[in-house]
Amino acid sequence: MKKLIFTLALITSLSFTGIAQEKESGNREATEKLSPEQRNTLQLKEMTLNLDLTASQQKEIAPIIAEQTAKMEARRSEMKAQKETKKPLTANEKFEMKNKALNSQIEMKAKMKKILNAEQMEKWETNKGKRKAHTHKTRKEYKNKRKPEVTK
């Protein structure tokens, strides 16, 4: 009788663990993605809160954000197509992609410098550094999570 109760308890605890993991992994696909316009609006509002943007600054930054979103969508679809072909990038292709990304960042910084005052620009740079560090950290965690555990 004790073995039966122990076995039932073990089975139920394992099933609950499986359900919890299933919900966690399936949660990402279940959420609806925001439209580019919605993301642009949210990003502009976050910048307004963080940098205390004036109404004229908001009007100037809105098209810049829209342009960045369009570039990001194009890059994302390009990367998805590259991933589907499963053909590794050559050194020249990697260089071109990195060069294009850096040119885009330089262009963005120049545009923002024209719009923001010195204090806002400093705060924007600081926030950008924090976002980059956070992105790097989460990517590293995701990469480590995906690695299969090696057992001997």
Image: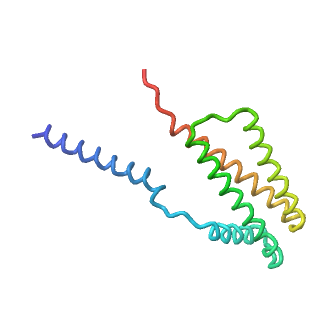
In the image, farthest residue toward the top: 152
Q: Is residue 73 above or below residue 8?
A: below
Q: Is residue 109 above or below residue 97?
A: below
Query: Residue 57 appears in which quarter of the rendering?
Result: bottom right
- Quadrant of image for the N terminus: top left
Out of 151 and 66, give the one closest to the viewer. Answer: 66
- Quadrant of image for the C terminus: top left
Compared across the picture, whether 106 is left or right of 91 comes to: right
Out of 5 and 53, give the one closest to the viewer. Answer: 53
Query: Residue 23 appears in which quarter of the rendering?
Result: bottom left
Compared across the picture, whether 25 is left or right of 135 comes to: left
Q: Position of residue 92 (x, y in %)?
A: 76, 35
Q: Position of residue 46 (x, y in %)?
A: 70, 68
Name the residue: 68% across, 56% down. 72
Q: Position of residue 111 (x, y in %)?
A: 86, 62
Name the residue: 78% across, 68% down. 51
